[in-house]
Amino acid sequence: MIKRYLYIFILCTSCSSIDYSYFKDLKNYYSKNKILVDQSFIDKQDYSFIKVSNKKNDAIFILSNIDQFGVYEWVGSNYEIIKTKDGLIVETKGLLSDIKFYSSDISILENVSSFDSQIDLYNPDLIFSNITLRINSKTAYKNNKGNKMNVFQYTRIVPEIGWKAEESYTFKDGVIYKSIQQINPMLDPLEINFYFKY
Amino acid sequence: MFRCPRFSYIALLIWISFSSYVSADPDDYIYPFKQYSFSNYGTIGLIQNPNARLLDEGSIGFSWSHNEPYLRGSLIAYPFSWLEVSYQYVDINNKLYSQIKSFSGSQSLKDKSFDTKIRLIKESQSLPQIAVGFRDIAGTGIFSSEFIVASKNLSKSLDITMGIGWGILSGQSIQNPLLKISDRFETRNSSTGQGGKLNVDDYFSGSAGYFFGVEYFIPKFKGMRIKLEYDGTNYKTENNIPISQASNFNLGIVFPQSKNLSYKLNYTRGNTLNFGFSYKLNLGKKNAQTVSKEKQSRINNSKAIKIVTSRSEQNLFKGALKYLSDEKIYLQHASIDKNELEVIFAQSKYRNPVIASGRVLNILDQIAPNNITSFKVSEINGGIGLYSIASNRDTFIRGRKQFLPPKPDIDISVEPFILERDMNYQFNPEVKYPVFFHTIGPDIRSQIGGPDGFFFGDVKLKSLSEIVIQRGLSLVSSISYGLYDNMDDLKLASDSVLPHVRTDIVKYLKQSRNFSIQRMQLNKFGQISPSIFYKFSAGILEYMFSGYGSEVLYKPFDKNYAIGVEAWKVYQRNYDQMFGILDDVDYKTTTGHLSFYYHEPKTNIIFRMKGGKFLAQDSGISFEFTREFYSGFRVGGFFTLTDISEEEFGEGSFDKGFSFYIPLEIFSKSYNSRNFGWGLKPITRDGGATLSHGYNLWGVTHKSHKNRFNRHIADFYD
């Protein structure tokens, strides 16, 4: 946040005033790059997609593959890759910091109290560290359209580095609908909204 | 069992290389944001005590702390990994600015000072890091102290510090160990005089004292750390007003909000709660504040374009004009000689000439027919030739595919360039003169730390324009209109015995609050040879002076030095900063300098020595040192010694200051050549003042230097 205000200050006091074109830079620096996903946006897409959001940006990833373990692979505009299993990000490539889960048989929906895996984190690197996802609560309700909604609250624990984070997975009629999770303790959580085209 | 020795060595090597991979260090997560934090004195340290730690070179920072009776704001910079420099303002709320109410009212004392710390020994497995430091070296000296300090990481969590201090850091008194060397270290003269001087005779003299402390990084706690120290400050003598101290121990905690922002809360002297924050940035590295820059987009239908451009040379020239223009690069002339396409271009988007020329070549490669086997591209600026790059097309394509930067003088030739007037280029797109460029935006002016109040300033709407009358001849203007100011109470009058070439700043600020002209300067740029550049200028040259003059620069392209000479006849402007000359003062003078520049290629320090006659008719030499980092960020300082006495100069004793220059593209994903330049002098005086005319030749021709290509050649395919 301070960096943004600093940037504004620097622009305002730069020795040779502001060029109109730099307002675009200023706008990008100051405001969130939002993508509005409404029905017309959904209708225009040929493939299933996800909207991935952090504090600063929204980005759209398109479904490119589903493997035998039910892992969905989503591809971004600069060929970044996010792989998800029931909304849980199990692998990323090309992000600011990446993550990789070693177990592919984990499932948020299997209703176990916790499950373990090993993970790698990249930038900074952490290799083959134990991770536990422990369920905190399950909530079931029907939304105003009559869909059956299930919300799973998990705690992510990586004891080696003291990483403990809360995350949530929302399913609509048994299909992942939205998830909020951190992929790196130094980054803001990512919110993913899932849009499936059948 | 027999084992081949050679095999075991190889196995060992493989094991080492793999083991270093698999045992990646989790410390970055266990101790995030583990850079050292700021002390209350605004430099890297413990709570009150200094330590031997520094930030990475190219870093700058700001620190603010409130520790009764002091409110301190500091700017800190790291021109080198071994050097810390800082500048502080301190509000001392138990002391008045002056005893004369009509002069400074009830304003509390504001003190400004420079600190520096130099790393002598870098920490190793067995040795601590050792640094020597100086506090308040060129101010009034009320916080003046020197120290030698050692810091050592005992574990990943624990950093211990101990040191010996002199001056204000002699609270825990011991006999000065330097007395064994010389008696000259026996007494310390506490007289502060006009301030601004280096009191070298006082350094490390008088009483000495010890101090120590620890910084404990709490593992897995988001980078939080605890500081505990045995305070070395002498509160009986600091600021000449004793401050009560109930304990020698200080305790503090630092909360990093992010890599750059930290908050702190301390309990000092056993009776004072103190808090503060700090913010730091590393601006020195490539893409220092962004992940990456925008990539050059490929031209659609390149194959079809090549078919069209192969039909006639004019098609190729027009294609180059169009596609270069899309990239904000403007083709000025073009020719084809045998199978070489030569393009002369001008641009102001790219600060880095390596990226600019690489992108021009990339566009030409995508549109030029296959019979073009080599390219020669040259950049000009205001009619001045900057450089020329020639590349074989196959070599360029091969390098781009493999992302292998070319080797200057092997894969590409990099030469100086002069635009010959009688050179017949085949394609000369018509430019309809005059060409008008215009920008508008906010501007902030400030006057800090005077007796009338700490901060006075205004916000103005500023218009910058340039009318290019013909190539190399232009009129640049800077006009502003005040929107808001708080300068009514600003009334400090000049007490200078020299001509008031700068100290009437308050009159200029107050009387130019509405509409004013900062510059209206007619420039004629030219080039006698590839190494000799000249400029004639006339008009309103800066906010206080109008006049006319000339500058000539000899700057051999492949050398690291340059020599410049300039002379100006100037007239002092009216305080309202309009067209008039100051009638009642009628100050006019001739000023001029001979300058020697040297760009040291390894450290990228630019040294400038400028000798001659200054604005107030004093004569002397100015020394400037500037470190330029890879990103274009520059930090530097200067001092000027002239033939006037300290008394004639007044407070500060001689002219000095420092400056930052931050390319704005550091914060942006797109390229631009704009910059934020900021200079600070501790005090505005008349001695050693130089004319601040726009567009000096060293700056205009900064791309005309082979070392720039050698240094940045890795950016060729960016």
Image: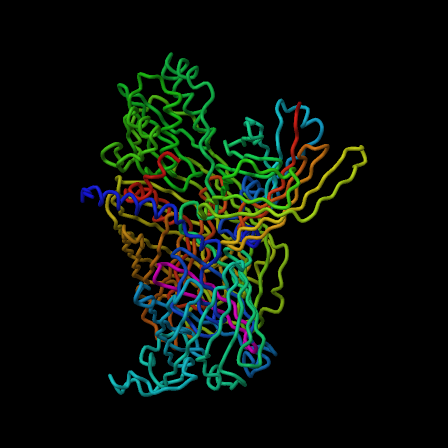
Q: How is the image coloured?
A: rainbow
Residue B454 place in picture, x, y as percent: 56, 69
Quadrant in which residue B510 is drawn: bottom right
Q: Is residue B52 left or right of residue B530?
A: right
Front-lying residue, B383 or B441: B441
Q: Indicate the quadrant containing the N terminus of chain B: top left, top right, bottom left or bottom right.
A: top left
Q: Residue furthest top?
A: B311
Position of residue B102 relative to residue B304, above or below, is below
Residue B521 can be seen, yes or no: no
Position of residue B480 relative to residue B499, above or below, is above
Residue range (magenta): B68-92
Prevailing secondary structure of the magenta residues: strand
Q: Residue at x 55, y 67 (%)?
A: B264
Position of residue B653 relative to residue B702, above or below, is below
Front-lying residue, B273 or A72: A72
Position of residue B394 relative to residue B631, above or below, is above
